[in-house]
Structure formats: C-alpha cells, structure tokens
Amino acid sequence: MKISLEETAKELSERNIRPSIQRVRILAYMKENLCHPTVEKIYNDLHPEIPSLSKTTVYNTLNLFLAAGLVRMLNIEENEIRYDIVMKTHGHFKCESCGEIFNFRINIDDFPADDLNGFTIKDRDVYFKGVCPKCRKEKVKEAE
Ligand SMILES: [Zn+2]
Ligand SMILES: [Zn+2]
C-alpha cells in the first residue's frame, strides 16, 4: 500500500503538528507497515532514505503521535515497546514461534463489560497468543 505523503502531511497539520519531512515519513511508514514496529525497526528502515534521522527523533516523534492519538503503544512484550497505528479497535495475536504480531478484527461492543459500571475505560486490549499458520506449517514439515 503506497501512502500519499501529501495526505499524511495534511493529517499532521490538522492535529497542529508541524509536518516536517521526518514526521511525515514516519507516519507514512506506520501506515505502510502494520507489523507493529519498534523504534529500532523504524529507524533501521528509514535511515537509509533519511540520513539525518536519529533514533531519538524517531522516539520523540512517536511520543508526539502518541499524545495526538495517531498511534498507540503495545506492551505485549515486557522488554520491548511496539507501536501501532490507530485503526478501528482490533485485537492482537502474537505468534510465540516467530514473534510476529497480527491484527484481527473484533467488535469490541460485543464484549460485555457490565461489571465495569462506573469505571472510566481508557483503553481496551485484546491479546491472543499461539502459533501462526506459517509456523504451524513449518512445524509439520519438521515432524515429517
Ligand atoms: Zn509465526
Ligand atoms: Zn495492531
């Protein structure tokens, strides 16, 4: 999926974020890569194209996006923070074999939360863990 940089810049302006080249590129990257990248991965992928980019810039930019509600932080792994572009509420499936995190569609309204009457809900996460189809196939091959 190719993301329009112009559209992305507009989106930042609308949220009162100055659309510097680096910010626009990072947001476009997030939209193109729904794989829940870490700061490390974003930096490694974008640095060849934007030599002036630093890891600190990536980190600060993500914090800015976080505050603006453009991305959310995923804490599936205790020792690594991944970032997710905000889309309609979705669940996450983590493959314990390859470590990849997949999105899946859920209808959060179907989850009854009657026990939380009087609570303010700020975030809803649905995490599943298991083995993805690709890794399952590889396991079968190994067993043969
Ligand atoms: Zn897998
Ligand atoms: Zn996600």
Image (tube, rainbow, N blue to C red):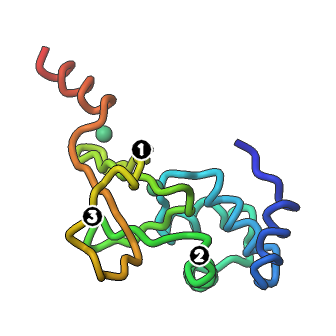
**Amino acid type of disc 2?**
Gly
For the C terminus, the image quarter is: top left
Q: Name the residue at the top extreme.
A: 144
Q: Image point 64% across, 55% down: which residue?
A: 31
Q: Which residue is label 3 attached to?
A: 113
Report crowding for label 3: few under 14, some 14 to 19, many 20 or more residues within 10 A (C-alpha): few
Picture coordinates of residue 134, whole percent (x, y): 33, 30
> Residue 69 bears which disc, if any?
2
Residue type for callout 1 = Phe
| Cα distance between the residues tagged 1 and 3 | 20 Å
Report the mark closest to the observer, 1 or 3: 3
Q: Residue at x 23, y 38 (%)?
A: 131
Horizontally, is 134 left or right of 70 in the view?
left
Label 2 crowd (10 A; few <14 / some 14-19 / many >=20): few
Quadrant including the N terminus: top right
Q: How far is mark 3 from mark 2, CA to CA? A: 24 Å
**Number of residue marks:** 3
Disc nearer the start of the sequence (2/1): 2
Give the crowd class for mark 1: few <14, some 14-19, many >=20 residues within 10 Å.
few
Q: Work out whether residue 33 or residue 42 is closer to the camera in this orientation and state it.
A: 33
Instruction: Report the residue that reaches farthest toward the right.
Output: 6
Judge: label 2 CB < 8 Å from ligand 2: no
- Say which residue label 1 marks: 104
The Cα atoms of the two marked residues, 2 and 1, are separated by 20 Å
Mark positioned earlier in the residue sequence (1 or 3): 1
Measured as percent of width and height from the top left, residue 143 is found at 11, 20
